[in-house]
Amino acid sequence: METEKIIDTIDIDEVEETSFLTLFCHAIESRSKDPIMYDKKAVAIADELSKVLTGSKKKIDRLLAAKKINKMLVTHVVIRAKKYDEYAKEFLRQNPDGTIVNIGCGMDSRFSRIDDGNVRFFDLDLPEIIELKKKFCKETERYRFVSSSVFGREWMNLVKKEKGPYFFMAEGVFMYLDPVEVRSLVLHLQKNFPGSELVCEVFNSAWLKRPWKGIVDFKLRKELHLGKDITFSFGIGDSNEMEGWNKGIEFLDDWFYLDADEKKLGMLRILRKIKLFRQSLWTVHYRLN
């Protein structure tokens, strides 16, 4: 794969590094037997990043470079990505000239997977991630990068220059953020893009209470080898909860990972009958009227 220049070092913090985990899950699954989703771009980027990560002092980096990631995590991440691609494609079927914003995009290559030749697509993330991404992906008139905190407001002015309707996606993002700021973001989206749609992954707020919170942190730091600063902060109790944040927020539908019809879920499908596990991490879909 051709890049603008050889990558010698990678300088991002632990929270931003979670985007690498998603990328490598895509790459690993793409090379597996009967992949749930094939992501050619992810394979190429992961191969290039591995050359740097293999010499990292961080354990998670070395595990990624060696492609040693929990199989169930790989399955979860890829099933989720496939579903979000389907959300995006359905939006484009209904709105051929629509604009999509991938909030907290990380190193995801969704544009290359869903591009229909018409979509206007924005990848939004922190400057460090966007600068790294530019080494592998090139901007076009329809595919733009935005270097900004998700809580910045300037990026909204940039997106508004493109005609709607607008579709906002936040895959694997909100649970890491401050609850007050997540609510503020959603309300600002509603104010600036009336009639837009939001698809976002959410965490069950019940798991943010003791003793469950300790179990979640243990899995993140000990089992997934993520940094000490990685934790889940935002959650909701049920799929309708955001409707109560402001008049006009309309719940459309939700999707549960364990309900996916994928053989690679294996025995995990048994847990779909237990609400606390079925509704631990799931996706909600709203219209912001």
Image: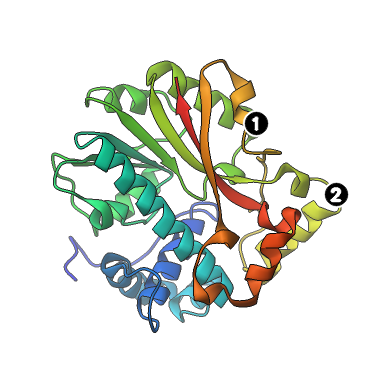
Q: Nearer the viewer, residue 83 or 215?
A: 83
- Residue 180 picture location, percent across and down: 63, 28
Q: Residue furthest bottom?
A: 33
Q: Position of residue 166 (x, y in %)?
A: 32, 30
Taking 189 as reference, is 274 left or right?
Answer: right
What amino acid is labelled 2 in the image? Arg
Residue under the image location 31 percent in, 57 percent down = 109
Check if mark 2's residue and mark 1's residue have beta carbons within 8 Å. Answer: no
Residue at image location 55% in from the left, 24% down from the top: 184
Residue 251 lies, with reference to residue 273, above or below; the image says above
The residue mark sitting in front, 2 or 1, is 1
Q: Which mark is residue 164?
A: none
Q: Quadrant of the N terminus?
A: bottom left
User: What residue is at 68 percent from the left and 69 percent from the top?
Assistant: 270
Mark yes or no: residue 145 visible: no
Q: Is residue 259 above or below residue 60?
A: above
Classify mark 2: helix, strand or loop. loop
- Answer yes or no: is residue 49 visible: yes
**To which residue does mark 2 refer?**
210
Which coloring applies here?
A: rainbow
Tag 1's secondary structure? Answer: helix
Q: Residue 171: where, in percent of width, then height?
A: 47, 48
The amino acid on which the numbered mark 1 sits, given as a three-letter code, is: Glu
Q: Residue furthest right?
A: 211
Whole-percent x and y of residue 136? 24, 59
Give the left or right position of residue 40, taking residue 30 as reference. left
On residue 241, the disc is 1
